[in-house]
Amino acid sequence: GLRNQLMLLLLYGLGLRRAELIELKGSDFDWSRGTVTIIGKRNKERQLPLPMVIEGYFNTYHQARSHLQSDVHHLLLTRKGKKLYPSLVYNIVLSYLNDATTVVDKHPHTLRHSYATHLLNAGVDINTVKELMGHESLSSTQVYTTSTFEELVKVYNRAHPKGS
């Protein structure tokens, strides 16, 4: 459904932690500036750029959920209008990843890991990735620097005198 699509898009498109996703509120989005405010670990606040594709999903979901009688201000809600809980997010991600991939690790953090790895493989500076992910130290970000074999071949061929 719409909620689950938006959930996956936010987890991967913004590299969010599961807890950050659960706590996200509609008021955290500033569409005029194209940013979203994320409250991370230890209540550390960071601003992230919003991919344009998120706005369409956000608006469609927001309209679709307007029938829910809820006093909860969180963006993503259960079918009963309550705040999401960690095991629900885990089960939704697991279900979608089971359909999409044969990767063994299938949990919300897999999408965060993919976000970081794809940025790094695309040449984004590791310090920028550190800031986007809300890491305190560079060593936390370095966990994501494992390159694919294809990426290693590409770099070798581009940079090494004996490369093609």
Image (cartoon, helix red, strand yellow):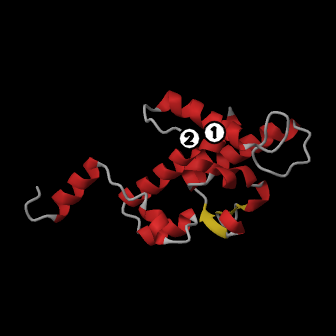
The answer to whether one can see residue 37 in this image is no
Please provide percent x and percent y for residue 90: 63, 39
Instruction: State which tag comes first along the sequence, 1 or 2.
Output: 1
Q: Name the residue under label 1.
A: 90
Question: Regarding mark 2 in the picture, which secondary structure is present there?
Answer: loop
Q: Please name the amino acid that badge 2 sits on.
A: His
The answer to whether one can see residue 119 in this image is yes
Q: Residue at x 87, y 48 (%)?
A: 72
**Quadrant where the image shows the C terminus:** bottom left
| Displayed quadrant of residue 123 | bottom left
How many residues crowd mark 1 within 10 Å: few (<14), some (14–19), many (20+)?
Answer: some
Q: Please name the amino acid that badge 1 sits on.
A: Tyr
**Quadrant where the image shows the N terminus:** top right
Q: In this view, does 126 lie above or below 151?
A: below
Please provide percent x and percent y for residue 13: 55, 51
Q: As rendered, which of 128 and 95 lies closer to the eye?
A: 95
Disc number placed over residue 99 in the picture, else none: none
Q: Is residue 155 above or below residue 139?
A: above
How far apart are the alpha carbons under marks 1 and 2? 6 Å
| Displayed quadrant of residue 124 | bottom left
Q: As rendered, which of 115 and 36 lies closer to the eye?
A: 115
Q: Name the residue under label 2.
A: 107
Q: Residue furthest top?
A: 99
Please provide percent x and percent y for residue 19: 68, 53
Q: Residue at x 48, y 31 (%)?
A: 100
Q: As rendered, which of 30 and 76 lies closer to the eye?
A: 76
Are discs 1 and 2 less than 8 Å apart at CB?
Answer: yes
